[in-house]
Amino acid sequence: EYMSGTSMACPHVAGAIALLRQVAPMAPPEALKAALYNTAIDLGTPGEDNTYGNGVIDVYQAALILANGFGRIEGTVTDSATGEPLENVHITIQPLNAETNSDQDGFYSLTIPAGNYLLQAERFEFFLWEDSVQVFSDSVISHDILLKRKPTGTITGIVRDKYTDEPVSVDMDIYYQEQYVQTVSSDPENGYYVIALPEGEYLVIVYPPVPY
């Protein structure tokens, strides 16, 4: 009999975590998660998907990773031009897919299994930053990040009624890689709008008033 869903997946994950706790009793939750993610056997659409998640758990391979120990990587993310700390920068460790965001002081910290990884940092106003890092067991690696700001461009236009040519006031939500950025409104008197954004590709969703 075939069964699927979170009701079946959850006990398997819980059992896998219990086994991994026997191997590494002091491992923090993020290290256990990273070990499971990094060793899962991918199925279906490459990468994480709604059908298979991150794949089929391979507890043995996850245990081998944790047996090598785990360490912590931390640092501060700053603007390369101003030296100001940057918050809400998305930090990822590949191929673990371990992730976190920098805090209001630009600080980030991740505890992961020992090994060699690619450290990446991104916020939509800045260019993607990445560097190779090596994390050692029972140690803290300091790795500060300097992000370079993207050039900014401006989009302008006028929103009008297709048939009457009268100006229309609308709200426009701007998204970057499915992340909400800002809302811009056109002028109710002339329909004019201005959007200033860093270079890149964006999704613009327009919300016209009734009866449009």
Image (tube, rainbow, N blue to C red):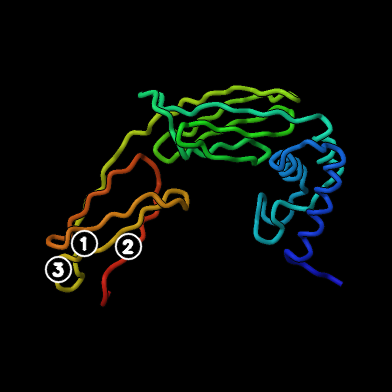
Numbered marks: total: 3
- For badge 2, the amino acid type reads Val
Q: Secondary structure at mark 1?
A: loop
Residue receiving disc 3: 165
Sequence-earlier tag: 2 or 3: 3
- Kind of residue at disc 3: Asp
Q: Amino acid at mark 1?
A: Val
Question: Of tags 2 and 3, which is closer to the observer?
Answer: 2
Is 206 displayed left or right of 160 in the figure?
Answer: right
Return the residue found at the far front.
26
Residue at image x 21%, y 61%?
A: 159
Callout 3 environment at 10 Å: few (<14), some (14 to 19), or many (20+)? few
- The one nearer the camera, 155 or 94, is 94
Q: Which residue is mark 2?
A: 206
Between the C-alphas of marks 2 and 3, the distance is 18 Å
Q: Could you tell me residue 139's position as x and y percent?
A: 71, 23
Quarter of the C terminus within the rendering: bottom left
Residue 58 position, x and y percent, is 83, 47
Residues 115 and 44: in front is 115
| Residue at the (55%, 33%) spot, across then down | 108
Residue located at (31% from left, 37% from top): 152
Disc 2 is placed on an element classified as: strand
Marks 2/3 in contact by CB < 8 Å: the verdict is no
Determine the image quadrant of residue 210. Answer: bottom left
The answer to whether 84 appears left or right of 192 in the picture is: right
Label disc, if present, on residue 159 of the rendered structure: 1
- Disc 1: CA contacts within 10 A as few (<14), some (14-19) or many (>=20): some
Residue 45, image quadrant: bottom right
**Position in image of residue 67 (x %, y %):** 84, 33
Mark closer to the chain start, 3 or 1: 1
Please indicate whether residue 159 sits to the left or right of residue 5 in the image: left
Badges 2 and 1: C-beta atoms under 8 Å apart?
A: yes
